[in-house]
Image: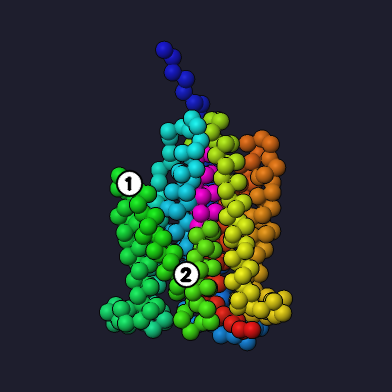
Amino acid sequence: MTLIRPTAGADGAAHRTGAGRAVAVLVLVALAALIPLLGPSAALHGTGEAAAPGAGGIALLRGVLFAALCVPLGERFVLRLVRRLPGAPAGRPRSWAPAANAVGLLAALALAAVVSAGNLIPHGLGQIDAGGLYDSRDGRLALLEVNGFLLAGLCAPARRPAVQVWPLAAVVVAEALRAHPTAEQSPLTGSGLTLVHLTCASLWAGGLFYTLRLLRRWRGDAAGPLLLGLYARVAAVLLAALTATGVWSSLRRMPAATVLDQLTTTAYGRALLAKVVLVAGFALWARVRLSRAADPLTAYAPARAEAIALGAVVVVSGLLTALPLPIRWS
């Protein structure tokens, strides 16, 4: 039997394509890191508000934590969808959940160190009071997030990796409670809205990312377009829930009569406006193109554009958590 080997030209083209993709990914990651690092000063410019010390670093860590949640939750979500596909190929991309949980653990540890230092960036080990974390609500929630990622990381390579969903769910609950302190009016309502919002966002963004990885693995197989269509239908429901909880949460902090003014005059409003533009202007546009694509090959491009937009949304969400809240209760 004669083996047909690829030509040197084909090898060179493949190498250039792979290198180009690697460079593009590095550029996107660098740009994403600039959003939380430079975002606070840009959002606060001219508002008369003051950011907490180290807001850029905290926004970056929070964005990394959100991204670390999206990857494993999205994988488990899409793998459940795959079970509903008849004749789906057995091949799966290598799971990125262990790496994502490790990154999330590091981000959670860094955020816990900030809480232990009085919500200030510690400049030495002497400023970190790990034992003091047990004495405050924020400290205990920070420890819950650390332990959640630690347990998820231990479960990810196990024989039943789906178990990692439970410690990750604990992280989501802790993040929802942290975002709404007890001094806030109706904190449980706010925490419930954040819980649904963060869960839907993680499944939408992380699910699309893993779906694209599966499509690359299943290239040429009929199961790929079926999975993309199934994901798109479920993601439409997630988008509806995401929009409803986002609008409700925004109106709780910015009453309807002041929304238009605060979207441009407060740092929180400006970051929220940027998030809305990314979702409605790019992700929703890509979703419309995805729903209208008759050819599966043409559907891949808008799906990838939607994934990039959602990645930016995750980073901007991290920025939102580090900006002063314009709480004006009606």
| Residue 315, image x, y percentages | 54, 64
Q: Is residue 79 magenta?
A: no
Residue at point 59% right, 61% down? Answer: 242
Front-most of residues 260 and 125: 260
Q: Which kind of residue does numbered mark 2 sit on?
A: Ala
| Residue 78, image x, y percentages | 49, 46
Quadrant that contains the C terminus: bottom right
Identify the residue at the far top of this view: 1
Residue at point 63% right, 68% down? Answer: 247
At mark 2, the secondary structure is: helix
- Region rendered in magenta: 202-215
Label ID, residue 112: none
Q: Is residue 214 magenta?
A: yes
| Residue 160, image x, y percentages | 33, 46
In which quarter of the view is residue 261 placed? bottom right
Q: Is residue 292 above or below residue 49?
A: above
Image check: 26 left or right of 169? right
| Residue 152, image x, y percentages | 34, 57
Q: Which kind of residue does numbered mark 1 sit on?
A: Arg
Residue under label 2, please give it: 176
Residue under label 1, please give it: 160
In which quarter of the view is residue 262 placed? bottom right
Residue at point 47% right, 56% down? Answer: 70
The answer to whether residue 35 is seen in the rendering is yes
Q: Are marks 1 and 2 in contact (CB under 8 Å)?
A: no
Identify the residue at the far bottom of this view: 48
Image check: 122 left or right of 7? left
Q: Earlier in the sequence, mark 1 or mark 2?
A: 1
Quadrant that contains the N terminus: top left
Front-most of residues 118 and 330: 330
